[in-house]
Image: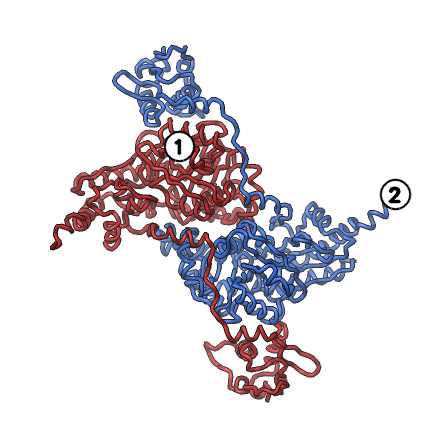
Chain colours: A red, B blue
Amino acid sequence: MINNTVGEPADTSLLSSPLLRGPGALPRQRQLIQRLKQAILAGQLPAGGKLPSSRTLSEELDISRNTVLIAYEQLTAEGYVIADRQGTRVAPLSAAASSAARHAAPAAAPSSATATRLTRIVSARHAHDGSLPMTPGTPALTQFPVNAWRRAQDRALQTAPATVLGYGHPLGEPALREAIAQYLRVSRGVRCEASRIVITEGAQGALALCVQLLTNPGDTAWLEDPGYRGAKSAFHAGDLDVVAMRVDADGIVIPEGAWTAQPPRLIQITPTHQYPTGAVLSLTRRLDLLARARRAGAWIIEDDYDSEFRHQGEPIAAMQGLLPDAPVLYVGTFSKTMFPALRLGFLVLPEAIASQATPSIVEMLRGGHRLEQLTMAAFIENGQFSRHLGRMRRLYRERQAALREALAAHLGIDHEVLGGHSGLHLTVRLPPAFSDVGIVEQSRRLGMNPSALSSFAIAPLAEDNGLVIGYGNTAAERFPALVRRIRDLALGSRRDATADARPR
Amino acid sequence: MINNTVGEPADTSLLSSPLLRGPGALPRQRQLIQRLKQAILAGQLPAGGKLPSSRTLSEELDISRNTVLIAYEQLTAEGYVIADRQGTRVAPLSAAASSAARHAAPAAAPSSATATRLTRIVSARHAHDGSLPMTPGTPALTQFPVNAWRRAQDRALQTAPATVLGYGHPLGEPALREAIAQYLRVSRGVRCEASRIVITEGAQGALALCVQLLTNPGDTAWLEDPGYRGAKSAFHAGDLDVVAMRVDADGIVIPEGAWTAQPPRLIQITPTHQYPTGAVLSLTRRLDLLARARRAGAWIIEDDYDSEFRHQGEPIAAMQGLLPDAPVLYVGTFSKTMFPALRLGFLVLPEAIASQATPSIVEMLRGGHRLEQLTMAAFIENGQFSRHLGRMRRLYRERQAALREALAAHLGIDHEVLGGHSGLHLTVRLPPAFSDVGIVEQSRRLGMNPSALSSFAIAPLAEDNGLVIGYGNTAAERFPALVRRIRDLALGSRRDATADARPR
């Protein structure tokens, strides 16, 4: 049937076997196109071969001539065939190309150094299922005023429908940046104007932006140990040389020689509520760090992730506001104060770099999520945010107290509760005889999700053994039973007990 | 009043001047805390100096003793003062620290090579104000079914309120990834399963992910010239060596020697609808590129940004699906098919790298925007997405026809319309006598927002002179007037005309 100019036998069954009909079948026109393409790519219809006339093919396949004509047009448009006065011929695809099509070998695996570095640190990751009790860092989602949020979204959508749908400012909605600036000045003692605020994909987006704006591969970054593992990921993604600094009851400890031996470009800290130990960075250390960072040309990243929930006294002011022109990039998030899936974080740029940095940020970010950003701005402006914070502060205070009581009454193991003046979690240090990783693994099987303190450390010491227990998402009355369950797991996994029980 | 043990005179006015009262004033407790902190940081209350007793200070300032006690407690917690049996004293802050606090020098400017590279390319950026007519790449926002979308969001929120609020899967909601996989297989001929799909912050997020996963600084990346400037930004952010490849009527042209002289790691292309020239990459070139990329160990990024809106024939199938295991990363976005502020894009990973890449993606992305993702999944599954696409396809076809007619009838200048078989824009090439940049600048002042073709080129040639005119967001009946306005601007800015008019 096919006039094959290069002499190879053409497989005509391709074209003569009937097309599928009936519900569930692709339109016949599309079936025909696919069948012809496959035959051409597989070499069954070789280059230069003439296709049957539209009349012939329509009769063979019992379809309308128009269907065939449209299929041929499509194949012509895509370059599979060439139509001229002599008819429609298979296009001369280069030999290399058609051989590649026939003998496809799988491509090489990815090999970026970044991917390799990041893959290596994966083992230490959190399971982020906020639905399990005791998950650190997850707020009380069932208490979130979903209906108020929905109504606020509807209002934002109705007020400016087309605005909300279009491309937005790469640095974020001006209304939200203004609302955040106002909030940070009053509530967190941050020195800022809206023009220096960038809306980011959570705190993680802000950290990534700091790395891109301020570092080159190979630069040194200090971080807290134990500390927030997202910072480690962000620094590894930027190919930074990561130096772990221990944390004690007064926050990060910088050994005297470190400023000259390993001068940092970035210093990541959580001064108001160290994650996960709960330490508050002392004023002496704050001032010292600011002075030395300035002298060394280093930048401090102040990650202020949950300090709104202070349970004793007033919130501790942000380090960024201690001095005018402090060398600090302030990072905040609404993941704890609102809800994680909102994925709204922000970065306050220091005045010294804000105007120079803006053009490159405009190249990296594209704005978007305008409806959510405008709704959040309205939530702050009309006081719903403050009221929600107040309610949650009271709730978390209650839940923390219940967890403390349950630990004292039911844990039945020597332990030390660290920090705890604020936030959504308590860290409980355990004696070395108990494996925190073992307890955590087994807890998940029993439907609890605390984290292992040792998994937050880059180089874990014996003292980094314990549990990081979230109370944000767990009702107060559940703690006695949960803590008893943890106790049983811990006693069962006791290293020396196991050793004793085994025959030698 | 202050018992100053180091002998310096203390400035007692700080403490004795009355606190502000009345509406608008901060709570007096907070005023007191701020005043004490400032005095300590400024050295007016020197280290070791004793603060007045709470009784004395409460009488001096006419406030309750409890307010003073709470203020002292807070200062103690933050490390400004030390309380012992002798009373409350200013903490010994290190000399370096307090001097740093007094003599604050502005910090150094940012210096990452990335920031510098990105700042350099800024000049060529789009103004992304989608509200102006003729903006390329902006869909018909006023036609978007806002109410249907809102109702779908409400349903998603009510179905699973707590789920929608919590942390999600780092690669995106499984339901959306499944819906996209299904859609891409049927409508775009992409070979994929949901497990290989990553939800990203628009197409830009997908490009950035490709760079992070697959390249090291200094690797070579090829891109189309003229081409999509977001690719240039993403490649520069990854410190890649960017090589511009010219585009003709059949898409990207790879000079024979390039594979050996500048072997690429990444090749960015828009094969179905070249941005901005509208060319379709020919099948011969597709197959050749696939075969050579595989042999060279290079990866092709297929950016399939607006091919749903084909105005002649059926949509052209994606290049990714041409071969099994093609070395292609397929990038898509809902910015054109839905609305830009949704900021939902996606990346289809090749099977060869999907499982190895996942752990490092998990370190880089954090999920989120779950409500929007689940709503989008429902929109696809229940057919609302297809119906919206169908309506928009008809609308854009009409608008494109109106623009073509207006150009033919009213532009009154020699011109060539490029591509135009699909999408949301037409590219109109102009004779060199007319400066596209000049016309564009003036258009904005008159409330129109076409782009200059030359601004898409890395090394603009004479033929890269023209206008990229969006019709997605512009009603058909407006084009005659808009095109006449462009004509007037163009004739006014004519280079030789201006030269002629000037006295020599």
Q: Is residue A451 left or right of residue B465?
A: left
Q: Determine whether the residue tagged by mark 1 lies in a helix, strand or loop.
A: loop
Q: Position of residue B214 (x, y in %)?
A: 49, 57
Q: Residue at x 43, y 51 (%)?
A: B364
User: What is the chain identity of the residue bearing mark 1?
Assistant: A
Q: Does residue A186 sit above or below B502 in this rendering?
A: above
Q: Position of residue A385 (x, y in %)?
A: 41, 39
Amino acid carrying label 1: it is Gly
Q: Which residue is disc 1 drawn over?
A: A257
Q: Does residue B475 sit above or below A150 in this rendering?
A: below
Q: Which residue is disc 2 drawn over?
A: B503
Q: Position of residue A117 (x, y in %)?
A: 42, 51
Q: Nearer the viewer, mark 2 or mark 1?
A: 1
Q: Is residue B158 left or right of residue A70?
A: left
Q: Determine whether the residue tagged by mark 2 lies in a helix, strand or loop.
A: loop
Neighbor class of circle 1 (other Cα within 10 Å; few <14, some 14-19, many 20+) is few
